[in-house]
Image (tube, coloured by chain):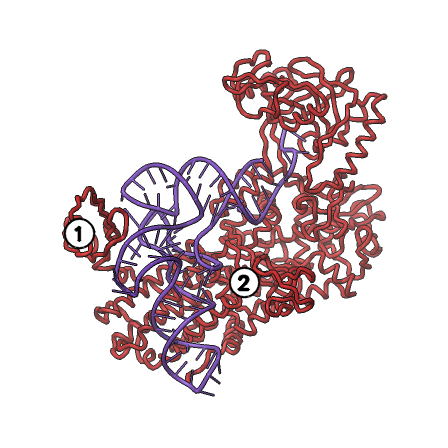
Chain colours: A red, B purple
Amino acid sequence: MAEKYDHSSIEARWQSVWENKKAFSTSGDRKEKYYVLEMFPYPSGKIHMGHVRNYSIGDVVARFLMMRGRNVLHPMGWDSFGLPAENAAIQHNIHPAKWTYENIENMKRQLKRMGFSYDWDREVATCKPEYYRWNQWLFLKLLEKGLAYKKRSSVNWCPGCATVLANEQVEEGRCWRCDSTVEIKDLEQWFLKITAYAEELLDHTYKMPGWPERVLIMQRNWIGKSVGAEVNFKVDGSDDAIKIFTTRPDTLYGVTFMSLAVGHPVIPAITAPERREEVERFTAKARAESKARGVEEIVKEGVFTGAYCVNPLTGGKVPVYVANFVLMEYGTGAVMAVPAHDQRDFEFARAYKLPVRVVINPPGKTLDPVEMEEAYVDEGIMANSGPFDGLQNTAAMDAIIDLLEETGAGKRSINYKLRDWGISRQRYWGCPIPVIYCDKCGTVPAPYEELPVILPENVKLTGKGLSPLAGAEDFVTVDCPRCGGKARRETDTMDTFVDSSWYFLRYVSPKEDRLPFKKDEAAYWMPVDQYIGGIEHAVLHLLYARFFTKALRDLGLHGSDEPFKNLLTQGMVCKEILKCPEHGYLYPEEVKDNKCVFCGKAVEAGAVEKMSKSKKNVVDPDKIIERYGADTTRMFSLFAAPPEKDLDWSEEGVEGSYRFLGRVWRLVTENLDALMGTQAYDASSDGALEGALKDLHQQTHRTIKKVTQDIEERFHFNTAISSIMELVNTLYQLQSGSDLKTDIGRKAFREAVEAVVLLLSPFAPHISEELWERLGNAAPVYETPWPYLREDALAREEVTLIIQINGKVRSKVTVPVDAPEEAVREAVMKDDKTNEWIKGKEIKKFVYVPNKIVNMVVA
RNA sequence: GCCGAAGUGGCGGAAUUGGCAGACGCGCUAGAUUCAGGUUCUAGUGGGUGAAAGCCUGUGGGGGUUCGAGUCCCCCCUUCGGCACCA
């Protein structure tokens, strides 16, 4: 009885070999580099299947390129500041640091158990002073450059997390992390000036062919560039002017009123005394409603201020309204209203019986403002626009801006939706913002030589009120670095997205202690050649990291414009949910015979959704590894779907992968007698192969080619694995035949088996090492070059042509490769089946695509 | 509403450039092995029809281009994702 495939002992053994030999330490050799990086995890306690998938993908790439001779950097670390640690501290009375480090230890054990090829010597954890010291250092540099600043403004406040959130961290009015409805608060906060890079961030999205188009589109939409004009409208009878931004200067003659956002600073000054009370009442009401604003669209409402302003082109007076649909955060918080050509203004005008003035007509038509049922927003011919009448509106745009610039009433302008990044967080477990407030000197940066500003350990955490650090007197009280007087430290910490915005740079020289990273190391390793992670960071981490890369470049710290050359966004890991009409989501063990074990009601099944604890459809990687091994777990997560698509978890599918590895195991171990006394077939010395052996040799090289291309060009690991499976199936057919009795047969067999083991190694490294060793190879797989493709093995002398008649497959014919049309025609005409189909018919057309197909049109 | 992606067997998915649709795996069926179950091995498996060879049909729906369309073009439907009063 042959030895069974024992995944546990094989995996444990090779993991210790890799660790003891430091198999994956990055080499100092300056040969062609490849930097492969997966998004580092938050140490929540355990890895989940999403991590398993993400890191399995990265590991295939890393191991493949190592075997291809590249100098590979493949690091791992921990995004280890953040709220869950603090919440755990409050709930379970354990210090965030202890909780975090214990989680890191456990997750590191899990990652090692998966056999990933990380260079653990480069591990970083953002919560360690050695790391966040450089966060603070970079913050001070940005402060010097004017790219960090403090301002009071209305900000997003999450009551659940008891902290402020950046715009990017609010999704549909809710917190990205805890789903609480976000409130608006007026607070003084630190901001990073990402808007200074708006244009470059946008521009480079058109120069990043290695990124998925949809991520680039999401970033472009988020940056939200609009080209148009700024126009000043003087307030009648006052020195005040209202500045507006418009993308439609061509409609300027159609302005019939003005809309201001609630909270626009000019409102108190211009509101007529008799309207004041009503305006205030409306403002209060609109403010209350905007807080509760949900998915439902609010009704457009407004109130007249009693003031008028003057159209700079016509001199006409139009009424000024406060309107609930105008946003203070975008543009100037004031909008020139052109009801004829803007749907929102149209609705408002109809509701408040304001005039509609048509200034653009559709080609060949004249619009009647009384009859119109919606705004006309398309292109057309200018009307009611003084000197511009008759022009195409697109042409009038430039002409009108020119006129505005001449008269000084306005100018060309570009507006972005992107806001500056608010990074102050009123929480404990984060990087302290290195700033000191002195009554005499004002805001003073902490001196560089005092970095890091250490996060104090003994702080009371309640989850309530503002900034926990404010209660740590020893931390707060400090001498002013400038005047030496009594001063206070900033008590907010940084958004943890700051930590992750440059960690990929730290990996290039993680132990450097004079700078965040070594410039020459960054020059060699950057940019990251392949970055892999979830799509959920499309406009969060991925935008911040791009911004930091550019800002740090401009600080002279490195020379890359963009951090990630190629980006792969992997799909989610999903699984069927089970739902009882009475008891909600159920675990699989709570269902018996499709019925709920609590109430006996029929269980709904079939819907496949993203794995989540709340839906009770998660699978614990530890259990799967325990039962099937890391290799099987990796294989399944790579085989079940291409990486960018969602993956449906199925226990049967996992068993299929396990079965396949068992098949490979037996293929080698049960044929060791035939395999050991021989060398792999070598065409130059072993003579020609024939028949099934020739086919095997060819299939071996076809498989090498396919697997290489699928990994290198497309990351389609599922098809790579399936082609290895096909080769294994062929070898099973052969092993029971007579071919293994000949010397040359054994050589061809060995060539194929070696290829299987090596091609499999990036996917299932442990079993590959074990089998490789058992095949008598001295060097481990990780030091063995990738199989060499012999193009000559792929050459064929004959090909089978498909014969189609009127587009339908009717027969086949075998002809020499690259046969001339005449010869093919002759061969086709000799084919019996073809003759039956064309008997008595005229051949109207004969299409021949060499080595592929013949199509005859007959009638 | 706007932007984007995707619709292929019972299921996950192949088909890289327009050229045999359904590779590979799961599931299912049958046979062999086994005391038996499991394991393993072999064969079959889109639908219709037929004893079989075969024939017809088939990639969300409708039209088109082409000798030839899952693939290219036009219209429509469905699902998923992102943004959503952005002036």
Q: Position of residue A397 (x, y in %)?
A: 56, 21
Q: Give me the disc on residue A649.
A: 2
What is the chain identity of the residue bearing mark 1?
A
Q: What's the residue at 42%, 67% (across, down)?
A: A760
Residue A856: x %, y % from top left: 22, 46
- The residue type indicated by label 1 comes to Val
Kindly identify the residue that appears in the image at 16 percent across and 50 percent down.
A839
Quadrant including the C terminus of chain A: top left
Q: Is residue A302 above or below residue A293?
A: above
Image spot of residue A173 (x, y percent): 70, 44
Q: Nearer the viewer, residue A743 or A507?
A: A743
Kindly identify which numbered label has been placed on residue A824: 1
Q: In the rendered view, does A696 fall on the left or right side of A707?
A: left
Q: Secondary structure at mark 2?
A: loop
The tag earlier along the polypeptide, 2 or 1, is 2
Q: Amino acid at mark 2?
A: Trp
- Give residue A637's position: percent from left, percent from top: 51, 63
As drawn, the label of residue A203 is none
Q: Residues within 10 Å of mark 1 (few under 14, many from 20)?
A: many
Q: In this rendering, is residue A269 above or below A765?
A: above
Q: Chain under label 2?
A: A
A436 vs A228, left or right, is: right
How far apart are the two marked residues, 2 and 1, measured between alpha carbons?
Answer: 49 Å
Camera-side residue of A176 and A124: A176
Secondary structure of residue under mark 1: helix
